[in-house]
Amino acid sequence: MLAVGLTGGIGAGKSALADLYVARGAKLVDSDIIAREVVEPGTETLAQLVDRFGDVILQDDGTLHRQRLADLAFVDTQTVEELNAIIHPAIRAELAAQRQAIREQAGVCIFAIPLLTTDHTNMLDLHKIIVVDCPVDIAIHRLISHRGFTEVDAAARVASQLSREERLELADYVVMNDGDLAALEAQADTLWQQLLKDAELLG
């Protein structure tokens, strides 16, 4: 199984690109989905979040109120680091388990990880890294127009992540998503053929 890390800043289009690869036959392990699962009611991770940020982050039914958590966590570098220190170990453990589960299978598996680092590459034994990229102003515009962020919130969320330069240093392949979906799909098709060749070479 060719294990491919897929990353990109918020608003860059990582999910859109992942969907295109799933449609072409790739298996997907999405850390955003895992991140939701590890904070479900009754999990140790949710308990740790409540200890740090208070029960104001819980809804009436005991589930996590993500916006309230974001409002409290995405304030400065320290609070972001505290949030990450709680959530990331749980996510990494589940990513590792899913990587092990597909190790002997064939094909291409996309590991979609927004905050992908060299630690992920080593831990998950990733063969290739794709970075989907776009200019910061486009990312901010997408967050405002598509996801309801305010301009201040969008800029703060983008600024809290790795810089474009840091992400691009990790890349084996770069997909520039500064156009429409048709342009993204054309790049996805070209790269998919390369990933199939990479998978064959593993065999």
Image (cartoon, helix red, strand yellow):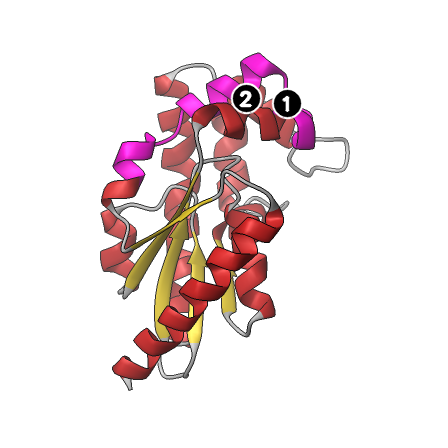
Please provide percent x and percent y for residue 154.
Answer: 54, 21
Residue 33 visible from this viewpoint: no
Residue 201 lies in quadrant:
bottom left
Is residue 45 or residue 167 the one in the foreground? 167
Task: Rate crowding at label 2 as few (under 14), some (14 to 19) or many (20 or more) other CA atoms within 10 Å.
Answer: many
Front residue of 112 and 99 = 112
126 left or right, relative to 161? left
In the structure shown, which secondary structural element does the residue marked by tag 2 occupy? helix
The count of marks equals 2
Decide which of 135, 122 is in the foreground and name it.
135
Q: Where is residue 33 in the image (x, y as percent from the top left)?
A: 56, 52
Residue 154 is marked as: 2
Q: In this view, does 161 lie above or below 33?
A: above
Q: Position of residue 167 (x, y in %)?
A: 31, 40
> Which amino acid type is shown beneath numbered disc 1?
Phe
Image vertical order of residue 149 relative to residue 15, above or below: above
Q: Is residue 166 left or right of residue 45?
A: left
Magenta segment range? 144-167
Q: Name the residue under label 1.
A: 149
Q: Which of 163 and 73 is in front in this view?
A: 163
Quadrant assignment for the N terminus: bottom left
Q: What element carries label 1?
A: loop
Q: Residue at x 36, y 70 (%)?
A: 194
Which residue, as the protein is rendered here, is positioned at the far bottom?
A: 203
Q: Please say if the residues under marks 2 and 1 sit with CB atoms less than 8 Å apart.
A: yes
Whether residue 84 appears in magenta in the rendering, the answer is no
